[in-house]
Amino acid sequence: MTEAFLVCAGSVALAEIGDKTQLLSLVLAARYRKPWPIVFGVLAATLANHAGAGALGQWLSSLLTPDAMRWALALSFIAMGAWVLVPDRLRAEDARPAQTRLGIFGTTVLTFFIAEMGDKTQIATIALAARFHDLPSVVIGTTLGMMLANVPAIFLGERFAHRLPTTAVHAVAAVMFIVLGVLALCGIDLSSQ
């Protein structure tokens, strides 16, 4: 349980640096200038999104044979490692939160949940849940990772984002995912140790 939680929190926190959802957090913070509703909106959206992604990962792991699952996980983690190295860009239409009657919290939940669909960290959550078979630890860990990356962005805004060594952070995240892939290829299960 501890290994799953720590690996999930660390890998997602690193993968989220410079990700489009972190950029969205910056945009929301700059637009609304009220950090707490944005923080709670990101938390709610992430919990919902990652709970669904984790459940999908667990379900997929129940469909595949252990050998097929090992290969699928190995390739997923290695692909995720390569994907983390590709910088994200926030499209102009994603940077404009919709004018709604939902308020800051509701707007944040809606826009962040949608932006996270198919994102690196959501795909990573699916793979991590399939790998560790510990849904609560995976969801709590990946959610903590998202919060570790997004809360400073929300509170410190643009000044903080430009000071991060994004390339180095992405390289560390890529190595973590590739190591997980190699461990899966070798049949080493961290969750049973």
Image (cartoon, helix red, strand yellow):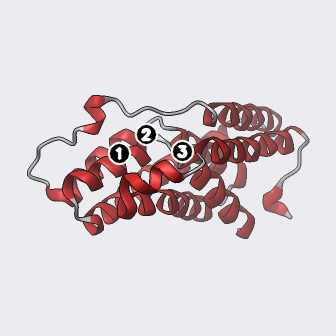
Kind of residue at disc 3: Thr
Dot 3: what SS? helix
Q: Nearer the viewer, mark 2 or mark 3?
A: 2
Residue 126 in picture, x, y percent from top left: 58, 44
Say which residue label 3 marks: 121
Say which residue label 2 marks: 20
Judge by depth and name the residue closer to the eye, 76 or 145.
Answer: 145
Judge by depth and name the residue closer to the eye, 173 or 63.
Answer: 173
Question: Taking 181 as reference, is 4 above or below it?
Answer: below
The quadrant in which the C terminus is found is: bottom right
The answer to whether residue 105 is visible is yes
Cα separation, mark 2 vs mark 3, equals: 10 Å
Position of residue 187 in the picture relative to residue 7 (left or right): right
Say which residue label 1 marks: 24
Residue 39 in picture, x, y percent from top left: 34, 64
Circles 2 and 1: CB atoms closer than 8 Å? yes
